[in-house]
Image (tube, rainbow, N blue to C red):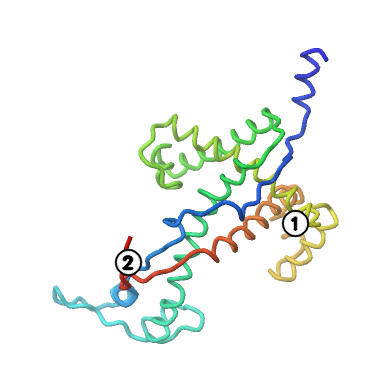
Amino acid sequence: MPDAMKKQRKEDMETKVTFIYDYKSIGLPEEMTAIRLPDMDDFIENQCRGLAEKHSTIELPKGQSHLLTDDMVKKEEIPGVETVEQYREILKKEIPAAVVSEQVHAILMNYLMPQLVERSTFEINDEEATRESMKRLEAFEANAKERELTLEEAGQKDFGLPAMDEGQVRQYVLYLGRTSFLFRILAREYLQRQGQIFDLASYSSYVKELTEVSGMPEEQVRDLVPVHVYMEEVPALTMLDEMSAWIAQQVKLESESEPKPKD
């Protein structure tokens, strides 16, 4: 086959995954899954003190702390929370859950998802992959400009990157774009093998379900999630949810007041 024909066939080829690695076989480093919580009593006291200062109209002498009252708590308009005691209880329940959720997301996006893509096998249309990477970079640059940040500042703020120059940040964002693109293809195939099809028929069911849950009109739901977004993004989000649940089972919380295990 002439080289020109080979090149044309490669350009016309649709990117696809040929082997999907089992993400549950990817070990999660212990330093990622073991989380030490701050001393909850001290943390809650600080939160209460900050809320009291926010709502107090009295200026106290230096060194004295404002006292949180039920009326101050009511001003926050937290559903089901009207007293200081209820506020303390909800903090006690929600802080560990929020810490776990944040760590699970970090593990998922910064470790497990990239590892899964790296260990799987694809037939890649480089032109398509490059186009998707550039979309990610252009969106990142536009967002940084809107926030009046340099690319270096945006990289540190959005991804927690160490000091990188502009070129290194661009390369990292291009890498993220390529990885996300490949993961979307992988997720669609992964779910299809489980019998989950994302087509016009399933889109209609999805819109109907979202309409019932959200209470929004059907047309508004279709505007928010057009069919092409549904087919491209929902499989990836569905698989990410599955992977998140698996990660969450492995995250261990330890209190700062508990002694650290000896090596």
Quick one: which residue is furthest to the front in this view?
263
> Residue 172, percent across and down?
49, 36
> Residue 63, percent across and down?
15, 74
Image vertical order of residue 95 relative to residue 140, above or below = below
Mark 1 neighbour density, 10 Å: few (under 14) some (14–19) many (20 or more): some
Classify residue 126 by image quadrant: top right
Quick one: which residue is furthest to the right in this view?
201
C-alpha distance separating marks 1 and 2: 51 Å
- Label 1 or label 2, whichever comes before in sequence order: 1
In the rendered image, the quadrant that contains the C terminus is: bottom left
Residue drawn where x is 33% and y is 85% of the image = 69
- The local secondary structure at tag 2 comes to loop
Mark number, residue 222: 1
Quick one: which residue is furthest to the left in this view?
62
Mark number, residue 91: none
Image vertical order of residue 134 relative to residue 185, above or below = above
Please give the count of numbered marks on the rendered protein: 2
> Residue 93, percent across and down?
45, 77
Which is nearer the eye, 47 or 58? 47
Classify residue 206 by image quadrant: bottom right
In the rendered image, the quadrant that contains the N terminus is: top right
Q: Is residue 90 left or right of residue 234?
A: left
- The local secondary structure at tag 1 comes to helix
Residue drawn where x is 32% and y is 66% of the image = 260
Amino acid carrying label 1: it is Arg
Q: Dot 2 corresponds to which residue?
A: 260
Q: Is residue 187 left or right of residue 8?
A: left
Q: Is residue 231 left or right of residue 57?
A: right
Residue drawn where x is 40% and y is 44% of the image = 156
Q: Which of label 1 and label 2 is nearer to you?
A: 2
Mark 2 neighbour density, 10 Å: few (under 14) some (14–19) many (20 or more): few
Amino acid carrying label 2: it is Lys
